[in-house]
Amino acid sequence: MFFNVFYVHLCIAMTSIYAFILALHSTWRWIVLIILIVSLLRFAYQKKKRLPFTPTDNFLKKAVIIAFYMQALMGIILYILSPITQYFLTHFKTAVHLRQIRFFGMEHSSMMILAAIFLLIGSLKSKNADTDDRRFKILLIWFGLALLIVLSSIPWEFSPLTSRPSFRSF
C-alpha cells in the first residue's frame, strides 16, 4: 500500500517537473538562437572589417556554448522523462515508422547532439588559429553549420512534420 501511494506521488511530481522543463526548454531555445545569430553576425562583421578578436568576441563564443549546453542538458532530462521517447524506446519497431514519435525519439536529439559537437569543434579549433581572420572564419563555418542544423531540427509551430507551439506556458 505504501509503495503504491509513493509511486503515485512520484509520478505526479515527475509530470510536474516534465511540464516545467518542457516549457523552459521551449523558451530557452529563443535565447540560444538569439545568442547564436548575434555571435555569427558579430563574427562576420569583425572578419569583414578585419578587426581583431576581442574579449567581447570570446565572451560571445563562450555564451553560445554555455547557452546551448544548458539547452542540451534540459533536452537530456526531457528525453528521460518524456512519454514520447519512452514509447519510442519501448516500441522501437513500431515507433520508428511514426513520424512525430521518430522525430523526438531519434532525429531531434541526434541532430542537436551533432550541432553541439560542431559548436565544440568550432570553439576548440578557433583557439588554435594563428590569425584573427582565420579564427573568425573557423567560428563562422562551425557555428554556422550548427545554426543550420538547429534550425532544421526545431519542432517549429509551422512545420507540417512535427508542429509544436513556439511558446509554452509555465
Image (cartoon, rainbow, N blue to C red):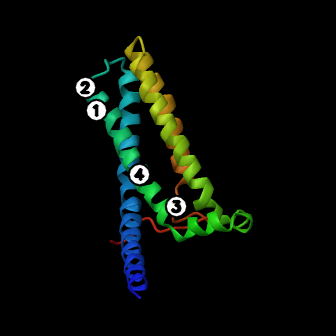
Which of the 4 quarters of the picture holds residue 24? bottom left
Q: For label 4, count other residues whose C-alpha is less than 10 Å away and answer few (under 14), some (14-19) or many (20+).
A: few
Residue 34 at x, y percent in the picture: 37, 47
Q: Nearer the viewer, residue 22 or 129?
A: 22
Comparing marks 3 and 4, which lies closer to the viewer? 4
Label annotation for residue 55: 2
Q: Is residue 94 above or below residue 38?
A: below
Name the residue tied to disc 3: 156
Q: Is residue 111 above or below residue 141?
A: below
Name the residue tied to disc 4: 73
Q: CA distance from mark 1 to mark 2?
A: 6 Å
Q: Amino acid at mark 4?
A: Leu
Give the left or right position of residue 87, taking residue 150 as reference: right
Q: CA distance from mark 3 to mark 4?
A: 20 Å
Q: Nearer the viewer, residue 119 or 166?
A: 119
Q: Please, what secondary structure does the residue beneath circle 4 have?
A: helix
Q: Earlier in the sequence, mark 3 or mark 1?
A: 1
Q: Is residue 26 above or below residue 57?
A: below
Q: CA distance from mark 3 to mark 2?
A: 34 Å
Q: Is residue 161 visible?
A: no
Q: Please, what secondary structure does the residue beneath circle 2 have?
A: helix
Residue 97 at x, y percent in the picture: 73, 65
Q: Amino acid at mark 3?
A: Trp
Q: Earlier in the sequence, mark 2 or mark 4?
A: 2
Name the residue tied to disc 1: 59
Q: Nearer the viewer, residue 95 or 160?
A: 95
